[in-house]
Structure formats: C-alpha cells, structure tokens
Amino acid sequence: MTTLTATQVSFDAIQVGDELPKLKKTESQESINNYGLLNRRGPPPATMGKNLHTDEEYASQGIFAGTVNQGVVTCAYMIEALQLAFPTQNVLSSSFNMRALEPFRPGDVVTFGGKVLAKREEGGKRLVEVEVSGVNQLGQTIATAKVTVPL
C-alpha cells in the first residue's frame, strides 16, 4: 500500500487500501479555551449560559465530567489530515460525514489517519471514498469520518 501525498496524488494512481499520512494532535485546556474565545466572537449574551466544552467548573458536572475539544475542532483536524493526502481545493469540495465516538480531552494525543475505501466514476466525476479516524493514546477511536473526495 502507498501513502498518499497531496503533491503527487492522481485518480489513476490511487488504489483501494492506500493510506493517508498520519497527523498527530495534542489537545490542551489552553487550546480548548482559545477555540472557545475565537468561536464566540465577542461577549456572550446573558441568556447564552455556560459552555459544556470550555467552562471547567460547569463541564465537571456535565456528561463528559470535564472539558473536551469541540467536535468542529476534531473535524478541522481530520480535514488537515486529508489535506496531506489530497489538494486543498479537492478536500474543500468533499462531502464529509463525521461521527464523534469518545471525548477528546485535555492531555490527549490523537493520531489521525485513514485509508482509501473505494474509487469510482459517477456522472463524469472521479470520486475517491476515504475513511478518516482519530485514535487517542489509549487506543480508543475518538472519531471517524466518511469522506468523498472529487478528483
């Protein structure tokens, strides 16, 4: 099997089973807080309430028993992994369906990778089906995504 690279990828050369390059991400409370601030874009309205992802005291009482990475950030990491294998313009034109399976907590180290499941031509388009997953340092799959990349 081959590891795909965005600068050399072509539809004809891709084979089922080819792998995406590995991308390792370490999450911290600081990065979780920073994304929360960036995402907020200004002070919250009084009715907004506390955030179960970023507010440490509030999150400690919630379903995850602590703060966790927001799912949109996990998606961004998966897209970054795809960009190592495919040109950015193709990745941004992809269909992307992610499922979160386990919390991505501060201190976790998650390795994202994936493989080609299929390729096909449909309606004049060349499409590559890819599965992307993130696995933490405990061996738990924290998220998977099915992606259709047009080439």
Image (cartoon, rainbow, N blue to C red):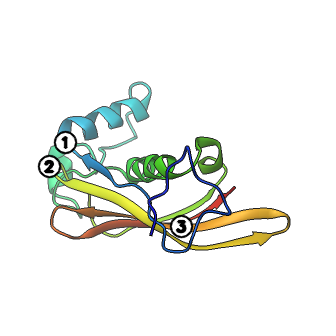
Residue 92, percent from left and from top = 62, 46
| Residue 44 appears in view | no
Characterize the local packing of mark 2: few (<14), some (14-19) or many (20 or more) Cα atoms within 10 angstroms.
few
The residue where tag 2 is placed is 107
At a point 44% along the width and 27% down the height, the residue shown is 41
Hey, which residue is sitting farthest top in the picture?
42
Give the mark, 2 or 3, whose residue is nearer the N terminus: 2
Q: Quadrant of residue 14?
A: bottom right
| Residue type for callout 2 | Gly
The residue where tag 1 is placed is 28
Image quadrant where one finds the N terminus: bottom left
Q: Is residue 70 left or right of residue 150?
A: left
At a point 34% along the width and 55% down the height, the residue shown is 22
Which residue occupies the foreground of this view, 128 or 102? 128
At a point 42% along the width and 24% down the height, the residue shown is 42
- Could you tell me if the residues under marks 1 and 2 are in contact, i.e. CB atoms within 8 Å? yes
Q: CA distance from mark 1 to mark 3?
A: 28 Å
| Residue type for callout 1 | Ser
At a point 15% along the width and 67% down the height, the residue shown is 138
**Secondary element at image label 3:** strand
Q: Is residue 101 left or right of residue 91?
A: left
| Residue 54 appears in view | yes
Which residue occupies the foreground of this view, 63 or 106? 106
Vertical placement of 55 versus 3: above or below? above
Q: CA distance from mark 1 to mark 2?
A: 5 Å
The residue where tag 3 is placed is 130
- Could you tell me if the residues under marks 1 and 3 are in contact, i.e. CB atoms within 8 Å? no
**Secondary element at image label 2:** loop
**Secondary element at image label 1:** loop
Give the mark, 1 or 2, whose residue is nearer the N terminus: 1
